[in-house]
Amino acid sequence: MDGRHAAFLSALLGLWPLLPVCAQDKDPSPAATATPSPADARPPRGDDDSGKPPHDRKDPDWLRKKFEQMSPEEKERFKKNFEKWKKLPPEQREMIRKQGREVERREFFKRAVDEALAQSGLNLSPKEREAYVLRYAEERRKLEQKLREELEQKRQELLPEMVERLKVEFSSQSGPAAPAPQPSPPASSGGSAP
């Protein structure tokens, strides 16, 4: 791929949160050109409405394919919005990116709640569901906090060992060139490789 192709893909990736808005923006009024609401910036879901992204992030050409699937009118709107995007100050671009991440976070949470409800087999009224969502959020925060604390504790236990290994490795250097990093032997292995 040449540099122009890479630059085009890079620009499209930066504008991904705006892609659905570009396809829907048919009204040239000032209200239509205002910053999109989080609901309007929502990335499209897959055809099966599973909540999964409609692309394979391992496929480097997924965004180009998405662009190619647009109608000529959508492509033109996208190009115009891209020009507007390039003119935005970096702070405003970052704000739009953050809004897109917030929308994704909320959708992820909604899918997690829906999955938990499906697994539980509960059939709740709208009021009960609202209470369930609040309790789920509270319990999920506790769980995530506990996992963060456990991870930090484990990190603090392993850091001195890592620092000591590096100290030994770098204090035993005899020349100016650093030794090539050697992989650690697997934990289940009884001996070390030559």
Image: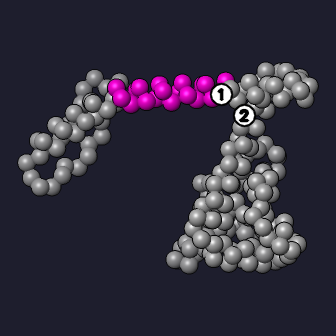
Residue located beneath label 1 in the image: 140
Residue 87 location, quadrant: bottom right
Assess whether residue 120 is covered by the magenta stretch.
no
Residue 45 visible to an observer of this rendering: yes
- Residue at 60 percent of width and 61 percent of height: 94
Q: CA distance from mark 2 to mark 1?
A: 10 Å
Which numbered disc covers residue 108?
none
Query: Toward which corner of the image does residue 30 lie, by quadrant?
Result: bottom right
Earlier in the chain: of badge 2 and badge 1, it is 2
Q: Which residues are magenta?
A: 139-157
Q: Position of residue 15 (x, y in %)?
A: 66, 65
- Which residue is painted at 27% across and 30% down in the image? 161
Image quadrant in which you'd find residue 62:
bottom right
Looking at the image, do the residues carrying marks 2 and 1 touch, with CB atoms under 8 Å apart?
A: yes
Question: On screen, 182 above or below 141?
Answer: below
Q: Which residue is mark 2?
A: 112
Residue appearing at x 24%, y 26% in the figure: 191
Q: Is residue 61 visible?
A: no
- The image shows residue 104, relative to residue 151, as above or below, that is below
Residue 164 x/y as whole percent? 22, 33
Q: Position of residue 65 (x, y in %)?
A: 70, 66
Q: Local crowd at mark 1 within 10 Å, few (<14), some, or many (≥20)?
A: some
- SS at mark 1? helix
